[in-house]
Image (cartoon, rainbow, N blue to C red):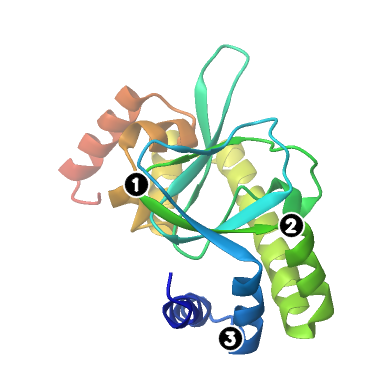
Amino acid sequence: MDKNYLIQQLKELSDGYGLGISEQAIEKVISFSRFKVYSKGEMLARSGDKSTTAGVVLNGVVRSYYIDKDGNDITQYFAAEGNWCVDSGMVGFDEMQASWEAIEDTTVMLFDVKDMKDLIYSDEQLKNIWINALESGMRYKIYRENGFLVENATERYMSFRKAYPKLAERVPLRYIATYLGITPESLSRIRCALKEKNTD
């Protein structure tokens, strides 16, 4: 990939999230990163793989998922443009805690976890961005847990639509259903009921 194009793309992602990462820091990241295009349905990583590599989605959508004790495929997280993926190593795990699959043809910037952490801890701006990312991750986790504790299935779906309006149109319904903890049939009924009320 052309370096100037990558710098521009990463700068646009940074600015779009209000991060304001410097061009110098972006160039450093590019210097130790590689870029890979995953086809729709292709695996980025599997649960139990070594987590020495992490990534950021440049375009496309991926999901993390696990298989529960009954063999059910449960979606844990969706990552679209600008989001971390295959990132277990970034938060201290030696192995991937979930499997990662491309939902669309997806381009990912991959890098060694140690290289990225060394850069983050050597740059005050990146360190602050990383702290904010960790706080955002904690808020997401609390939001997910609270949703299952206090919201019914319809409310969880409406919260998902509100929080991720673009993802709702890009992700297959069966994955959204497992993310919400319901069956695809239940999600279809919810969507039909909401359409009748003109709120979907």
Q: Please give the residue where the numbered disc 2 appears in the rendered image.
A: 113
In percent of width and height, residue 96 lies at: 69, 38
Q: Nearer the viewer, mark 1 or mark 2?
A: 2
Q: Please give the residue where the numbered disc 1 appears in the rendered image.
A: 104
**Chain-order first, disc 1 or disc 2:** 1
**Labels in figure, total:** 3
For the N terminus, give its image quadrant. Answer: bottom left
The kind of secondary structure element at disc 2 is helix
In percent of width and height, residue 168 lies at: 33, 49
Alpha carbon separation for disc pair 3 and 1: 28 Å
Tag 1: amino acid: Glu
**Chain-order first, disc 3 or disc 2:** 3
The kind of secondary structure element at disc 1 is loop
**Chain-order first, disc 3 or disc 1:** 3
Alpha carbon separation for disc pair 3 and 2: 22 Å
Q: Are marks 3 and 2 in contact (CB under 8 Å)?
A: no
Residue at 74%, 57% in the rendered image: 113
Q: Please give the residue where the numbered disc 3 appears in the rendered image.
A: 20
In the picture, the disc for residue 167 is none
